[in-house]
Structure formats: C-alpha cells, structure tokens
Image (cartoon, rainbow, N blue to C red):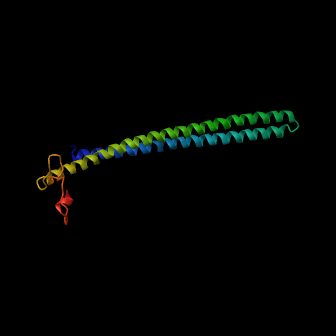
Amino acid sequence: MATEKQTATRVFDALSETSTALMEPVKAGLDRTHRFATAVVREAEWVQQETLGFGRRLAEEPGNVLGNAGTAVQKAGEAQDRAFEFVRLSIDEVATAAREARTAFEKVARANLELGQPAIEAVQGLVTRTREAVRPIVPFGGDGAKESAPATSRTRRSGGSSEEAA
C-alpha cells in the first residue's frame, strides 16, 4: 500500500502530465497559426505585386491586346496554382492539428487513469481499515457475510390448522 506522500506524488505527477499534454497542442497550434498567417501575408503580397505588374504592362502597352491577353491567361494560371498550393497547405495543417489533438487526448486519458489509481487505492485502504476496526464489534462468518439463523423448509402459517400447512 502506498504511503500518503507517495500517493500525493503520484497525483501531482499525473496532474503535471495532464497539464503538459494539454499545453503541447496549444503551443503547436500557435506555431501552426503563425505559419498560416505568414502564408496568407505572402500570398497577399504576391497577388498585389502581380496585379501591379499586370496593370503597369496594360498602361505601358494598351494596344497590345494579344500580348496582354496572353499575360492575363498566364497570371490566372499562376494564381490558380498558388491557390491550390495554399489549400493543400491548409489541409495539411488541419490534418496535423487533428493528429496532435488525438495524441493529446490519449496522453490526458493515460494521465487521468494514473490520477484515479491513487484514489482507488486510498478507498481500498479506508475499507480495509474500517473492516478491521469493525470486525471486533460485528461478528462475521468465514465468507465475510453476517451469520444468520438456518432457514427451515417448512413454515407454519398462523391462523390455520396443521393440515393446511402441509
């Protein structure tokens, strides 16, 4: 049986493990949010620069309809490629977050299991001590059940004759 100091140590170790298991995904989430925000800013800068470049080309060569149309198609294709890459990045981040959350929940569950074990042991110890304290006062049989009078197979009914009882 664990001592009270050992039990307290186990409880606080389990609480510490739970806290750590919960903080790890929070930290990872902050890193993920930073990466995502950086990607959004990078894409906004790219779109801004490409739009300005295309606008400058239109202003410099307004009569070059064929060249400007080709540039517009090229820029639209590049924008689509970048959009697909951005969506892929987003999906990867969500999948990573889901894995990290699952891992965190597993760690918390294990820590809570460890946290419950000292409580179970404490209750078992209390029951054992109570049984030992009560044993001299209350007689118990060998199987732990209170001894009772032997049961009879025939009971006598009140108010009737002995023939009716048989």
* Whole-percent x, y for residue 36 in the image: 58, 41
Return the residue found at the far left: 136
Camera-nearest residue between 64 and 165 = 165
Q: How many marks?
A: 0
**Residue 5 placement, left or right of 50:** left
Q: Quadrant of residue 10?
A: top left
Residue at 21% of width from left, 45% of height from top? 3
* Whole-percent x, y for residue 74 in the image: 76, 33
Return the residue found at the far right: 63
**Residue 51 placement, left or right of 35:** right
- Quadrant of image for the C terminus: bottom left
* Whole-percent x, y for residue 71 in the image: 79, 34
Return the residue found at the far front: 163
* Whole-percent x, y for residue 18 in the image: 38, 45
Residue at 75% of width from left, 36% of height from top? 76
- Quadrant of image for the N terminus: top left
Camera-nearest residue between 24 and 124 = 124
Residue at 55% of width from left, 43% of height from top? 33
**Residue 114 placement, left or right of 96:** left
**Residue 8 placement, left or right of 41:** left
